[in-house]
Amino acid sequence: MKPLYVAVDIGATNVRVALGDETGVKKKLTEITDRSKGAGGIAEQIIRMIKALNIEELASIGVGSIGPLSLSTGCVVDTPNLPFKRIPIVEPLSEAFHVPVRLLNDCSAAVLGEQYYGACRGLKNIVYVTLSTGLGGGAIVDGHLLIGKDGNAVEIGHLTIDPESELVCGCGCRGHWEAYCSGSNIPNYVRLLMRGRDAEGSLMLKLANGNPERITTEVLFTAASRGDSLALWIIGKVGEVNAIGFADVVNAYDPELITVGGSIALRNPELVLGPIKENIDRHLINRRPEIIVTSLGEDVVLYGALALAKRADS
Ligand SMILES: [Zn+2]
């Protein structure tokens, strides 16, 4: 019988659990991340979801999670995107299923998924970037997955764009890349850019019922995709900041391919990647790599967690 693995993707918005074998992800379950039962409730939710898959002989479990992580204790710690200080993952899952459990930052898992199942097969220098509720990355350099002392080697969302910025990141620092360009923070950047500008007649403002406080990331992209000039100008500004972030990534890791995932990029590939490609060259010292949207779509972290589970079993 083929060994069966469980892949887990812990996000701030959704928890996803999948059954997989060596060929790929087979059966998936998705639930809203349960914040109602405290820090321990996240592992309880995952255990319940895995049990619902009715797996007779489970070989191992791979988990890709929002960070930051403490790999030595198997916990998520001080994450800006969930209201808990320390979320235990590895220990409760090991105790419940008595199989090897491996944990990685979700983007580190994703880059592993790209290498095993995605567009990066056969490549030794690759980076995955997610533009989603939060912003993060994973990197494989010279064939080695970068992990770091606590599992947070590629926390690129917290690279500083401007230390004097008015925009404060979810982590508490000023002017981080994520403070401008993540799904939860784009609305703050939009309002900063709109200050003192005439927004009269803008579709973006209309979609927000005339109230700038109600402009969401979705409203911005919807207005831009319908040709609203103010929204398109803001999309360009967001893209300029993303271009700095991507250039920092290229200058640091020298990848041959960058794949991009996360809901913002997956839903708006042209509006997101276009301005990055237009602006990146003036910040680069290293040779420019190819930048594409991930072919694994919203399952990229699950595929990575599956690859991780397979590693744990071998
Ligand atoms: Zn930050």
Image (tube, grey):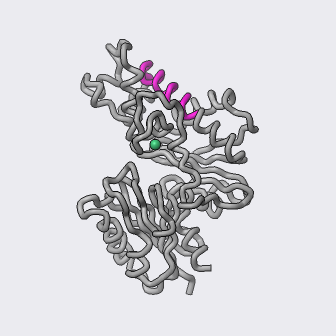
Describe residue 142's horizontal placement relative to residue 53 as left or right. right
- Magenta region, main secondary structure: helix
* Quadrant, the C terminus: bottom right
Describe residue 29's horizontal placement relative to residue 256 as left or right. left
In the image, is residue 101 part of the stretch drawn in magenta?
A: no
Residue 313 quadrant: bottom right
Q: Is residue 44 above or below residue 197?
A: below
- Which residues are drawn in magenta? 227-243
The number of callouts visible is 0
Q: Is residue 196 above or below residue 283?
A: above
Which residue lies at the image location 42% right of the left edge and 22% below the top edge?
193
Closer to us: 189 or 5: 189
Q: Is residue 31 above or below residue 59?
A: above
Image coordinates of residue 98 in percent, x first then y, are: 44, 84
Describe residue 52's horizontal placement relative to residue 145 as left or right. left
Which residue lies at the image location 30% right of the left edge and 25% below the top edge?
212
Q: Is residue 106 visible?
A: yes
Image coordinates of residue 169 in percent, x first then y, are: 42, 39
Image coordinates of residue 243 in percent, x first then y, are: 59, 33
Residue 211 quadrant: top left
Image coordinates of residue 180 in percent, x first then y, are: 45, 34
* Quadrant, the N terminus: bottom right
Q: Is residue 266 visible?
A: no
Describe residue 300's horizontal placement relative to residue 93 as left or right. right
In the image, is residue 236 part of the stretch drawn in magenta?
A: yes
